[in-house]
Image: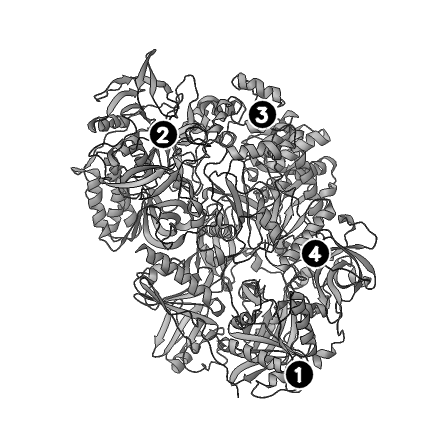
Amino acid sequence: MVKLIAQTPCEGQLPMTIGDVTLTEVVIQTAWNVAPFAGKEADVSKALEAQSGVGFPAANRMLTKAGSRSIWVGAGRALVQCDGLPELSGLAAVTEQGDAIAAVRLDGPAAEATLARLVPLDLRVSTFKRGHTARSFVGHMAASVTRVGAEAFEVMVMRSMARTLVHELEEAAKGLAARA
Amino acid sequence: MRYNAWQIFKEAFTGQTGWKPVWRDPEPKKEYDIVLIGGGGHGLSTAYYLAKNHGLTNIAVLEKGYIGSGNIGRNTTIVRANYFLPGNSEFYSHSLKLWEGLESDLNYNVMHSQRGLINLFHSDGQRDAFVRRGNAMINQGDDAVLLDRDGVRQHLPYIDFDNVRFPVYGGLLHPRGGTARHDAVAWGYARGADQRGVDLIQNCEVTGIDISNGKVTGVQTSRGPIRAKKVAMVAAGRSGQVAAMAGMRLPIESHVLQAFVTEGLKPVIDHVVSFGMGHFYISQSDKGGLVFGGDLDFYSSYAQRGNLPMKEHVMEAAMTLMPMIGKAKVLRSWGGIMDMSPDGSPIIDRTHVDGLFVNCGWNYGGFKAVPASGWAYAHLIATGKPHDTAARYRLDRFTTGRGIMDEEGTGSQHNLH
Amino acid sequence: MRITCPHCGERDRREFTYQGASEIMARPDADAGVSAFADYLHLRDNPAGDTRDMWYHDPCGAWIVVDRNTVTHAVTGSTLAREGRT
Amino acid sequence: MRLKGKGFPDQQRSVPFTFDGERMTGHAGDTLASALLGNGVRLVGRSFKYHRPRGVYGAGSEEPNALVTIGHGAAADPNVRATVQELYEGLEARSQNRWPSLKTDVMAVNDLLSPFLGAGFYYKTFMWPRSFWEKLYEPFIRRAAGLGALSGDHNEDRYERAFAFCDLLVIGAGPAGLMAALTAARAGVDVILADEDSRMGGRLLSETTEVDGKTGHLWADDVLAELRGMDNVRLMTRTTVFGAYDQGTFGALERVGHHKPRKGDELPRECFWRIVAQRSILCAGALERPIAFPNNDRPGIMSASAVRSFANRYGVVGAPEVAVFANNDDAHRTARDLIAAGVKVSALIDSRDDVEVKVDAPVFTGARVVQTSGRLGLEGLTVEQGGRRHGIKAGVLAMSGGWNPSVHLTCHMNGRPVWDAGIQSFVPRDGAIPGMTVAGAARGRFSTAACLADGAEQGAAAATALGRKNVISPDVPHAEGAAYRHQPLWAVEGRGRKWIDFQNDVHVKDIKLAAQENFRSVEHMKRYTTQGMATDQGKNSNVVALAVLADATGRGIPETGTTTFRPPYSPVAIAALGAGAQGKGFAPQRFTTSHAASIARGAPMIEAGLWYRPSYFPATGEKTWREACDREVQMVRSTVGVCDVSTLGKIDIQGPDAAAFLDFVYTNTMSTLKVGKVRYGLMLREDGYVLDDGTCSRLGEMHFVITTTTAAAALVMRHLDFVAQALRPDLDVQIVSVTEQWAQFGVVGAKSREVLNTILDKPIDDDSMPYMGCADVGVAGVSGRLFRISFSGEHAYEVAVPARFGDSLYRLLVANAEMFGGGPYGMEALNVLRIEKGFITHAEIHGRTTAFDIGMDRMISPKKDCIGKTLARRDGLVDEGREQLVGLKPAGAVKQLTAGAHLFDAGAVATRENDQGYVTSVCYSPTVESYLGLAFLKNGRARHGQTVRLVDHLRGIEALCIVCDPVFFDPEGGRLRG
């Protein structure tokens, strides 16, 4: 019997370190878009928490617990990463998205300045803290940007744009490194 | 006074002291046969052709600012006749013919320069759409040439043909397309109208339109009431507000279109060039500045200024298309207020009020239309019948669905152009 | 220009797509007829001053109704289209 | 010449550079302008119109004269202000707008012709004969005009863009800006302090003024040291805030690499910053204005403040003998500073009568400069005092007509500045930019003491407005606080041209001529004379010009008008504003999962929207795309082909009201669709025209997945969100794009089922997967989806798997197809296959077509409302005379049919009046063995069987065609179900 081989969106492109920032691919095993039906937000959150350990996040926030995460990804929508398809029938639209996303992590003292070349967001740590997430743009690409550490961010774009994402991050980091 | 070689020579040796005012500054009279609301390009050309073609001179052009203070002085100066839908084809064709005789007609050098306009395309589908357009231009009696990639390279060697996001497949050359000196067009028409007896009244804002028993009787202005047998609105950029004075709502939204000019540079861009993968068009003025623009800012506005995202988008288009342009420096940016109609085409028509006429909805194509718009509007005002070339510019086309002219194919409803 | 998305907060204009006056939310009844629909779709107050219009916050997918001034570009408020305010 | 012991440049460290090829030496810390003056170079450029010799006028970014080109080849940077360009080792500068050389410029003949070339001369002449304009006059004018030249080479430099956010943006780091930033920063405010200069301190760097008992620049250094030590402060030097935009957004340009020799190409030349600030304080200082006197433009005639900058900051002076001409006290310090530096001051000429001048030099009060001499540089001047004339020897004349506050940014949002009679200049209008206040000289508070105090006050006010409690105003340091005393003097009478706009060569008489010809509005005057339209945008000249116009028209200055400024404050390179877009950066690239496999098979890739898709797959021996395309079509029609269709939009629709929602957005009814079935659907815009088409599959009672065309995917998604949120919030429905989740492949042709059954966990047959069926399936052990739909008229499927398996599945499908005599096919074949079946794409539904036009008006269900239904009924949209979709076949032998050709009645002349329609799509069909076309023809459905004339003027093609049904192949659809 034939077996299909999986590839990651940034296969062969990462990791790389440029100056004071390191780019690595975040490999997503499974993820679902969870969109509660009208009036079911609280029920969904409760059920999600029971199943995965993380509830439905508030707008612009990420919840993490053990291996699970739920990230707000837009009006009434969360990206839930956990083991196993959440059972929310009748409560929410659950849509597989684990293959739809390219995710890259930026680490290092230059991570914020690298993103500041591409993202029209106020990323100052005083306003955009660990666990904060935002739907915005990276260059011309719609993206989720999440702060995962004092000097660490995760950026998610559409899978088909993985190459552009890596390229733009790389170029931004190069220009920054050349100033040093 | 007529300008001629002798006069130029004489004035050079008498310290230029003999030149007369190019127009008068008359006080408004109590009554006119025709009042035109708006002293921009279209208002001035309408006045000129009313006088010249129809012998009507008891006319006032009321301008709330200075003559030519609207979009006639805030555009990218492109003159072309490369439309393809019936209605637009014959109108812009007529306009281009008028441009070609404008200088001798007005005895004023508007620097109309037919340096050729090239629309670039970047896919087979775009090519076919441009071929349809080019064939329509030739059917109309105008000119168009299909260029392949090498043909474009011969005309525009500086374009990036190799390392580019959307490679150039070819272009549609419109040899008679070009540019003109925008302010001079306003001044030339103003001078011509004034010489024929039209009163150009600056700093005179219309504050009301008087209507009695369904018939227009005059206007209220910041300089007092003025009676008129006919009133013609021609105030693109403020059409909605003017029409509201007559109790009308128009199918118009007002938007900002930005334009840019760089510092003066030695000649480098000979044609008017238009990028097919985003609104971007460029030419070089006789002073050496690169004059270019792009798409609307895309929000309704009367502010005559834009914001950074669209500026950036325009500059991005410039950099991907012709990266030799990078070190040209933007000197000035400004915004014009565009009367955006649902289908992107204008309106020249009567209204429900007897004696009240409307000319609006020029979207971002008003400059090149100035001669034909004035010609057709003058005809309508003078005779009560639409001119053949503008018969399709009806106000009711959105209700009947007949003759909708959506050149871009993006939809005949607002905010899609 | 910066506009406030009720979900995401104040954002650069580049994150939004514009869709004209909020009158567009008051769609006529199915049987209102051609002329009512033609007026609804095409005719606009087009005010020089305060206006209320529709914007789509592309990255988060929310349609919002924004209170704005077309002369000064001041933005004074915004709500979700879902809340039904025209 | 250098002044020993003066200035910051390290006079021990020599920096070699060239000017017009001549080797020269400057010092570290010099600008190009100071280095040229240090080398005794006064002639630096030629003016725009008359090509008059010009030298350095100022010391800052407002410089109108000393514009040069830096570097060569692709790096050549034209119109660089020598006063801003910092010197570095190996810098290569060239003068501009001269030929053959700066000293001997042929075009200077224009200056002799100047009696002809007054304001507006273009408009009155060059009309005879008409045809000479493009051929003779215009090329000549164009060559004479312009300043520097672009290299014509593609840009090779890196430029960059970035965003920054702060609570308070302080623009300008002179005494006011430093105090404002310091006060706010100490209160805990997040501050960005930006200054266009390479070193912060503003005028303190150029004056000998003391602050708190220290030389001004030392005091500035102390403040900067404190600011640098604070986490909440960001100092941005070499950064010009060039534009103010809505809601506290500013554009700023940082010069990152221009002051360094090039090493590699990674360092950006410039960075374009978008700065967002809750509040801002404009501390941009003021600019000195010139006086218009006869021949006031010779190299060596400079602004007085620039002469002080060069002497005090850079330790240079343009000539051994300097005269000063002013109408204000402030300029007197020029003479004092020069004398202190050991320079001979040959005269101080003050236009005021009642003034006491404490300067150890010949003083002329109540006097004016009425003439100057020196062909390529100032040699002397004539002073008139009480009717007597005095000849003065001077190589430099420092002139000052007073100061203009730098109001520019406050004008960017249409705020007109207001006239202040006290300083005879314009000051910013309060509140012109929301959130912005103005401090110091930028609002007419000219003394150092006033600037310091005002900066502190505005800084404290901003901190308070930002919600900081207990803001402490620091002690304002002690500094000179002399009142600004001046008496207006705009223009001096006398023979000769009195220049106002140096670069554009506008002089007093031009403005008077404009007034004489009734160009009396300021805007008319500007546009008629080009006053203020040069690269300095009138920063130096506008107020003088306005005063001259006011005088000529007999009005006061405020009645005459105001001067306004548009962004950018100083010119900004297109490469910076559009940074990142060059090459492929204009738009994201989207790659399918089969991209690598397609490339490996040699497929040329074409752009389809943002996506790349294979055009065709060349086989050995094939020389043209047509050969490959014909083979691929025949392959699909005879055996099986595989095609990546992942780029089509896929949207997941779920919820209790999902079916009702789809009924509202599609013309046809989707609520009656059974689970496991697929239906073709048509969407309209509200204006009744076709928006898009695609399929709708019902996966569950409350779960659908629909497809869109590739081009319209984002548009349709936004449209559906609009309908759901703005029009029908009553419907409980969730809409999620799944385009990227699934890699989807068409498996098309008679052998398609056999190929699929090689990889499906559970084989299918006609019963388990009938035509227009859909189901979840196992694909080689992976959960996937299968749809039995066709865009080719063949028995066909689309199989989808999670995208991570896309590459693998594609390779597998192609390999297995090959076992059945099939293989991959590209966009060209796909296009032929759909034309043969009369299926439409965006070539047909191009935004102007209605359901009626494409023969689908019966798909608009009469039983329910939907978007676009009512307006699609408008008379004009269902008129029989509209252009309707038809097929075209050649009548007899033809060379080719072409898309974009127009149609006419056979025998009719090809004119607009006779136009009957146009061709949208064409192909050569190897199946039908003929060219085929799809076209829109007036009343076309009633004209099947008629002959029409196809004319493509552009390609030189003419053909007679038979009008037919658009379905050319298998009209009964037997193969679909086969």
Q: Which residue is mark 2?
A: D289
| Chain to which mark 3 belongs | B
Please name the residue that numbered disc 1 is placed on: D770
Residue located farthest toward the front when viewing the structure as drawn = D621
Question: How far across and how far down the image is residue D740, in percent?
Answer: 51, 71
Label 3, label 1: how far apart the Cα atoms are: 81 Å
Helix, strand or loop at mark 2 = loop
Counting from the top left corner in percent of width and height, residue D842 is at 64, 62
* Element marked by disc 4: loop
Distance (Cα) linking label 2 and label 1: 85 Å
Verify CB contact (< 8 Å) between mark 3 and mark 1: no
Q: Is C9 left, or right, of D391 in this rendering?
A: right
- How many marks the image carries: the answer is 4
Tell me how far mark 3 sits from mark 2, CA to CA.
Answer: 31 Å
Label 4 and label 1: CA atoms lie apart by 39 Å
Asked whether the viewer can see residue D717, the reply is: no
Q: Secondary structure at mark 1?
A: loop
Q: Amino acid at mark 4?
A: Gly
Q: Amino acid at mark 3?
A: Val
Does residue D153 show up?
yes
> Where does label 4 land, which residue?
D900
